[in-house]
Structures are given as structure tokens and as C-alpha cells.
Amino acid sequence: MSTLIKGGTVVTAGDTFTADVLVEGEQIAAVGRGLAGDTIIDAAGAYVIPGGIDVHTHLDIPLRSTVSSDDFFTGQRAAAFGGTTMHIDFSIQPKGATLRETVDLWQAKAAGKAVIDYGLHVTVTDMTDAVLAELPQCIAYGAPSIKFLMAYKGVLQVDDTTLFKAMQQAAKHRLLIMVHAENGDAIDVLVNEALAAGQLAPKYHALTRPPELEAEATTRAIRLAEVAGAPLYVVHLTNAGALEAVQMARARGGSGRIFAETCTQYFFFTRDDLDREGFEGAKWVCSPPFRTQSDHAALWDGIADNTLQVVSTDHCSFWFAGGGDGRPAGKELGRASFAQIPNGCPGIEERLMLLYTHGVRAGRISLNRWVELCSTNPAKLFGCYPQKGCVAPGADADLVVWDPEARRTLSAATQRQRTDYTLYEGWEVVGAPRTVLSRGRMLVDDGRWHGEAGAGQFVYRRPFGL
Ligand code: MN
Ligand code: MN
């Protein structure tokens, strides 16, 4: 049985052309004119793009006494409805665990639930000599990207000794080091001062994590990586100062070694969103926090001039009103103090639509750049290209038929993400997925779900640069 996606405009990172795409089994068999197939998907007037790849997500993530609201089934189904057919989640090392145990723990979360293909990064929180020695094994685990947090003091934060030693290992073994770059020590001082002064509202989350402390940590991580000779990927970059650090590093010769992403939400919101009436601002609490309008402009420039190579989501959904009706506790945990608000926002579903509407249609980026930022660069940087991230014979048939004129109003009432809010309530987008295939299987067609829990597979990714 073959499937023919007929008469669409194929859009890749490099080209835009009219062609049929023939899918046989799980792969693309041919791309060309006048092809024949058993089942026809009419793509006239639509774009045919490689499925989105979101390299920064947190599904089923434990946080203190609670857990995020989306698991691997609901989060991945939401991703598929938004045109994302692969994501890379962070397996987070529990204190004392080996990295093997860490990856296995996250594999167990996905088992029987996955509906799209997924990879795993490894977040190291407890670096012993044994863990340092185990780092190269992450290649055998299919998870050759290792993340460290320079913030969350006393919980997840690592010191520079740990980070630098890991970078030395990474340089030797082709691991990609990823950093959450904020100066956790200085933030800890500012948070404690705010708490002591009775400044407890959600807005103080943003005010105690100023952009300079992200710029400083970004610079520090880059300089450490340069000395160690390791490739570095800065996650969720939010502001002009941090962007400048990446720009300078790439200009002095690090363009093949220093990389950075931003996330969808950082183009749209500011710290003022945390100051919305009552406790509403808690919905916008994530780290790093939202910045200012001028940072939005810097980020749009950053994706246009390739200072930033990827747009991901940092999807980490919590209920706004959790803790009852079978819901795990959520944002309400922080009613008494911003320091207790679970950090994170939903967004795995809306990324492609928002970037298409506000990026492509607004004339800020090209169609091809949109595909590159959302699919092709993620696949290349994270070791799964051209299996993923392209429309070519032999690639996995992870394909999206994109209707460029479809209008949607984003809303908590209609989203597939399992949470009771969206940051984009009432926003209209133009351009949305019509049909979504994962390795040739229909997942979504005209808004209807056809996916099957357990069909998604773990993607063993190659070491950096191979
Ligand atoms: Mn982070
Ligand atoms: Mn994250």
C-alpha cells in the first residue's frame, strides 16, 4: 500500500517546488511529477513540509510534589495536531542515578503512550566521577546531547567545575553540551531579598531574574566551551544581551561550534504579562522569564540572520487551577509566593502556526527559513538528518500538508494540550496543518485524530557532527 500526496508545493529548508510525494511503507519513496499511488491525499493549494521537530520539551516531568499536566500521549497528540512529528524530551537524572537509569526512566514514561517519534537528551544534575566516566555512553544510549543547568541553585544547578569537565568529555566524544544559561547564584540572592521584603506576586519572578544574568551565564558557557573545544547549544535564549554573546562567539569563528535556540513564546510576551490582574500572571511564569518588546525585535533579527538556528517550545504545561478533580497540583501552588509557582508554559501545539503567521506571513522570515528553524536544523544539530527534517526519498515519511489559508482561533477550549489555559487565548492564526503523517501513518486529517498510542518510536540519534 502506497500513499501519494498529490499536487502540493513541497517546501524544504532549501527549495520550494510543485511535486507529488510518494510514500511507501514508512518512508518517502519518490518526490516528482506525475507519480501514482494507491491512496491519494490531495495537496493542491497546500504546502508539503517535513514534520516539525521540537527539541526542547518536558512531558510528564516531576516537580517537587507534583507533575506536569501533559504526559507522552497527550503532549505528543497535541504536537501532532500542530504539525510537529518528533520531539526531544529531557530525561533528568535523579540524584544518585546512573545516566542509563535516567534514560530508562524516561523511556518508561513514553512506553505504550508515544504517538510520534521522540528522542531524549540527558540532563545531568548529580555529577560524580562515575557519571563523568559514563557520559560517553550516552552515544550508545542514542542520547548524545547533555544538558546542564546553570540556575536553580540547590536543586538542579551545577557549578563551573562540573560544566567544564563535561565540556572536556564532550570535546573528546562528540557530545553536544546544552545549557540553561542563567546565573543561579545571583538569582538566589535576588529571590531571597524579594521574599524577605514581602515581594511575593508573580511579577517578582521576572524581576529577580534580570536579563543581564542570562547574558552573563551565556557568555560564561560560551567561553568555557571555547577553552574546552566543545560544541555548545544554548537553550531558550530570550534577550538582546544573550543574543549579542552568541553573535560575537559565532563571529570570532564559533559558527560551527556555538548554537542557540529561542522558544515561540519569547517573541510575544513581556515581563508585564506576569503583572496581570490577581494571580493571572502565574500562567506566564517560566524561566528564563519574559523580557521586553525590544528583545522581541532582537529575537526576530536573530532568527533571520542565523544567530539563532532553532525555534523550540520548552513545553512544560501545568494546570492553572490544579490540585483537584484528578488534576495534579499546578500554578496555584504559588499563590502565596512566586517562588513556589511551577515554572513552565504549554506550547508544543502552537509553534508552527505562530511562526507561520507572525514570521512567514508577516514577512519576517521566508517559508524555507520557517521549515529550517522548525524542522531541518533541529534534525541536523541533533543527529537525525536526513532520516528526519527533510522531504526526500529514503527519509521517514513524517509529513505535514499545510493549508496556508486555514484560520484558527487558539483557545484553551479547543486545544489538545492537557491544561486549562493557553498563553494565546483568542489569538487568530492563519495557516495550519490539514494532514499529518508519522512514518507514513495518518495521525491527523481535517482536525480528526487517527493516531495510535504506542506507535511512536524512540529515535537513536548520532553523535554531534556525524
Ligand atoms: Mn530551562
Ligand atoms: Mn526546559
Image (cartoon, grey):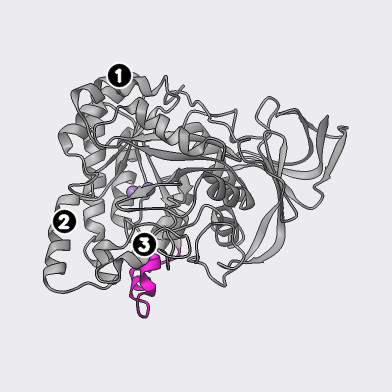
Mark pair 3, 2: CA separation: 24 Å
**Residue 312 on image: x %, y %:** 47, 48
Residue 36's disc number = none
User: Would you say residue 278 sits in the magenta stretch?
Assistant: yes
The residue identified by callout 1 is: 172
**Residue at the (53%, 70%) spot, across then down:** 425
Q: Label 1 crowding class (10 Å Cα cut-off): few <14, some 14-19, many 20+? A: few
First along the sequence among labels 3 and 2 = 2
**Residue 245 on image: x %, y %:** 28, 47
Instruction: Name which quarter of the figure residue 120 lies in.
Output: top left
Label 2 lies in ligand 1 vicinity (Cβ under 8 Å): no
Label 1 is placed on what type of residue?
A: Lys
Q: Is residue 48 in sight in this rendering?
A: no
**Residue at the (48%, 66%) spot, across then down:** 423
Q: Nearer the viewer, mark 1 or mark 3?
A: 1
Q: Label 2 crowding class (10 Å Cα cut-off): few <14, some 14-19, many 20+? A: some
SS for callout 3: helix
Region of the chain picked out in magenta, as a range: 268-284
SS for callout 2: helix
Label 3 lies in ligand 1 vicinity (Cβ under 8 Å): no
Q: Nearer the viewer, mark 1 or mark 2?
A: 2
The residue identified by callout 3 is: 295
The residue identified by callout 2 is: 188
User: Would you say residue 323 sits in the magenta stretch?
Assistant: no
**Residue at the (37%, 24%) spot, across then down:** 138
Relative height, residue 381 to residue 404 (above, below): above
